[in-house]
Amino acid sequence: MKIAYLIHWNEGPSSGVFKKVLSQVTAWSELGHEVSLFLYTHHWEPDWNREFKSIPLQVQSYRGGLRRFTDFRRLLAEVRRWEPDVLYHRYDLYYPGLPALLRQIPSVLEVNTNDLPEMRAGGKFRYGYHRLTRSAVLKAASGFVFVSAEMADEAHFSKYVRDKIIIGNGVDLSGVEPSPVEKREGIRVIFIGTHGQSWHGVDEIAKLAAARPDWHFDLVGIYASHLDGPAPDNMVFHGNLMRSEYEPLMRQADVAIGTLALYRKQMGEASPLKVREYLAYGLPVVIGYKDTDFPEPVPFILQLRNEPDSIAAVREEIEAFVAAWRGSRVERAQISHLDTAVKEAERVRYMERMVREGGRR
């Protein structure tokens, strides 16, 4: 099967999305399929080519203004020229020509976020444009992959969806060695995120840091300016780092923190990439939402209430969780279902069905 992966993405090889896309297309290729990535970006980096190695990569750069629409059509022409059996697209914005291509070829949209609340929190023009045009994209797709059941059930998606599957985000377990347990003084906590995303709940982490000045907090991908006021002295903001740069911090950590304020974009369920990476390193995790791949409680995930001031309400519970897990690691067998090999085999089977059924039914 020839699979064309179409994505609009502007962050480079250090981003979690880049790592996810790389693991996806690599797994599809290893399963015996012919894969080509079609990238639309205004932030081209040579590292893209180096990282994808044997996977063909077609890049279309763009600049601002109406020229970006012409540039996108050029990329769509390259997709057609390659003649794929199926088109896989990470759902984003409407561009002229995209719905027609989605109807022409059996197509699957990957939906990673509850788009309307997230767009509403941004600029008014972008939100208005998306609100007016999103239906054209959603109506054109053959199938949908949602990363959470909650999103799959959203009315503003379900009214357009004819066929869907839920596949939470995964991680390439073969590429990560669990961290060894090292005896040392103090508690180290790590958080990895993206600057400027309020739903990460960095302000909640700051409250915990202020309450436990004896703990050390490493924040990757985040800058101190994310907070409205001064940060506690025990919070270290590392900014953007490559994996090779933040891996020592992961190996030193006793516990990791996931998203703590998902309610800020009207969501209660997710499967964040960073949490899968924490678990791959063997780290227990504190989160503030329901995880798609762990519908029932597990001892290595402490799930807080998805509401404001969640840290303050259960601080003693967090302290007990950290104390119980200090010196321990999550066993690999407990997270084997998160492996990319498992996730991508299921995704490919879904795409194969879309091809067999001829896309639109």
Image: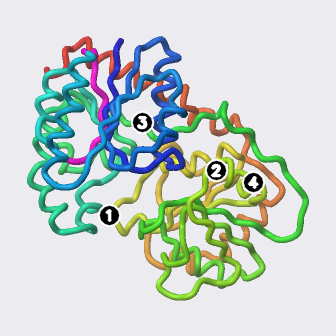
Residue 166 on image: x %, y %: 37, 36
The C terminus, quarter of image: top left
Which residue type carries mark 4? Pro
The N terminus, quarter of image: top left
Which residue corresponds to mark 4?
248
The stretch of residues the image draws in magenta is 83-93
Query: Would residue 160 be found to the left or right of residue 115 on screen?
Result: left
Which residue type carries mark 3? Ile
Of pointers 1 and 3, the one earlier in the residue sequence: 3
- The residues tagged by marks 1 and 2 sit, at their Cα atoms, a distance apart of 24 Å
- Foreground disc of the pair 4, 1: 4
Which residue type carries mark 1? Gln
Residue occupying the point 73% across, 41% down: 331
Quarter location, residue 116: bottom left
**Under tag 1, what secondary structure?**
loop
Query: Would residue 248 be found to the left or right of residue 134 on screen?
Result: right
Could you tell me if the residues under marks 4 and 1 are in contact, i.e. CB atoms within 8 Å?
no
Residue occupying the point 39% across, 45% down: 148
Which residue type carries mark 2? Tyr
- The residues tagged by marks 1 and 3 sit, at their Cα atoms, a distance apart of 20 Å
- The residues tagged by marks 3 and 4 sit, at their Cα atoms, a distance apart of 30 Å
Query: Would residue 262 be found to the left or right of residue 273 on screen?
Result: left
Q: How many dots with numbers?
A: 4
**Under tag 2, what secondary structure?**
helix
Which residue corresponds to mark 1?
266
Q: Nearer the viewer, residue 306 or 143?
A: 143
Question: Residue 278: which numbered mark, if any?
Answer: 2
Question: Quick check: 131 above or below 3?
Answer: below
**Under tag 4, what secondary structure?**
helix
